[in-house]
Amino acid sequence: MMQTDIFTQSADKIFSLANPSSGFDAAIWSQVEEAGFDRLLLPEDDGGAGDAFEEATAIVGSMGRHAAAVPLVETLVANWCLSRAGLKVESGSKAFVALDSSQARYEDGNVLLQKEVIFCWAPVADQVVVLVRSFDGTSKLIVLEGIGGAVGTSMASDPLTILTADVKLRPSHAVLFNDGDLALALAALLKSAAMSGAISAALDLSIEYANSRKQFGKPIGAFQAVQHMVVRIASEMASVDAAVRYGAGTLATEPLWAAALAKGRASEAAGIVCAAAHQLHGAIGFTREYALHRYSRRLWSWREEYGNERVWYRAVGEAALADSTSLWAKMTERGLLESPAR
């Protein structure tokens, strides 16, 4: 825990200086690269710390807590994939997209999109890395130097590119990839960690507002209904934080199970937290001048990235049905119900 605290403190020093305006924060990204955060999951010989999943969640959690507009999750996962695939890891920011066979297929040296696909961070990325997972369990890792398409922004104000079905993309590299499940799980886990950080910030804002805003001569935090809202946000934060820490500890051995619990819980919590926080703040919570929207918009956007709660809870159910033991036994055997030590 002490080591992750050091990473958190180091990340907080950088991300606390984040520009609250929307779009890519180039100044913060420069500091991220200087600190080596983008290469954390690379082997030690390449300047990383290996599969330091717990440390990565700590750094990404800080990014979410300070609403830093940088593609750190995507670059971390893309760099890890490139290294695992034996490809050169170039410097610079990256976009990472995980697709299945219903969304894209690789044929004749091209990637053929079969559905509309959103490439978050692609407009500012130096490389676009695409993971195509087939239903037969095989995966393809594909590197695109650039893509066309319509440019816009997500609900979180992150830049994105939208490509329609039947678009063909010619990659610079395309290799078979044996770690497709782990790559998707890593992306989902890190996005969950970012959401945990955003929920923490929303809780802090809610507590501060409840203690400072007065009604009928006393702080609104004295009213039981408001206290219930704060407790609801705090309980969701504790649940997501526990799921993320559990996921970081089990990702290497059971990636899809770890990701399903973390991302499913984080995506579910996003709607609950945003509803409670905005209800508590009233009209001020919807203004651009107040900070709450930086976190609620990110939570609404991030809950859909790398699978929402419906996708991941289905995975939990399928894992339970595929196991000869009961779901209760599966949970208790893996320590899911134990309180993680801080």
Image (cartoon, grey):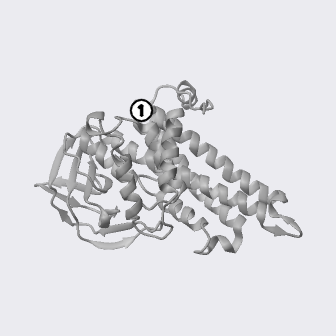
Question: Compared to 18, does 240 lie above or below?
Answer: above
Residue placed most toward the observer, 313 or 92: 92
Instruction: Kindly indicate the quadrant of the structure image that contains residue 322.
Output: top left
User: Where 187 falls versus 305 (above or below)?
Assistant: above
Location of residue 261 with respect to 306 vertically, above or below: above
Camera-nearest residue between 125 and 129: 125
| Rendering coords of residue 227 (x, y %) | 78, 55
Numbered circles on residues, count: 1
Disc 1 residue crowd, few under 14, some 14–19, many 20+, Cα 10 Å: some
Residue 313 visible in the displayed image: no
Question: Residue 237 vs residue 149: left or right?
Answer: right
Q: Residue at x 46, y 70 (%)?
A: 22
Which residue is drawn at the image coordinates 68% and 49% (left, top)?
A: 234
In the image, what residue occupies the spot 43% across and 47% down?
188
Q: Position of residue 337 (x, y in %)?
A: 61, 31
On the picture, is 199 further left or further right than 143? Answer: right
Above or below residue 123? Residue 202 is: above
Q: Position of residue 308 (x, y in %)?
A: 47, 53
> From where the camera sits, is residue 220 visible?
yes
The residue at the far left in this view is: 108
Q: Quadrant of residue 326?
A: top right
Tell me the quarter of the image containing the C terminus: top right
Find residue 176 and report its horizontal and vertical position in percent: 19, 42
Q: Secondary structure at mark 1?
A: loop
> Along the horizontal axis of the image, is 123 left or right of 215?
left
| Residue named by callout 1 | 254
Which residue does the image show at 43% across and 67% down from the upper left? 154
Label 1 amino acid?
Glu
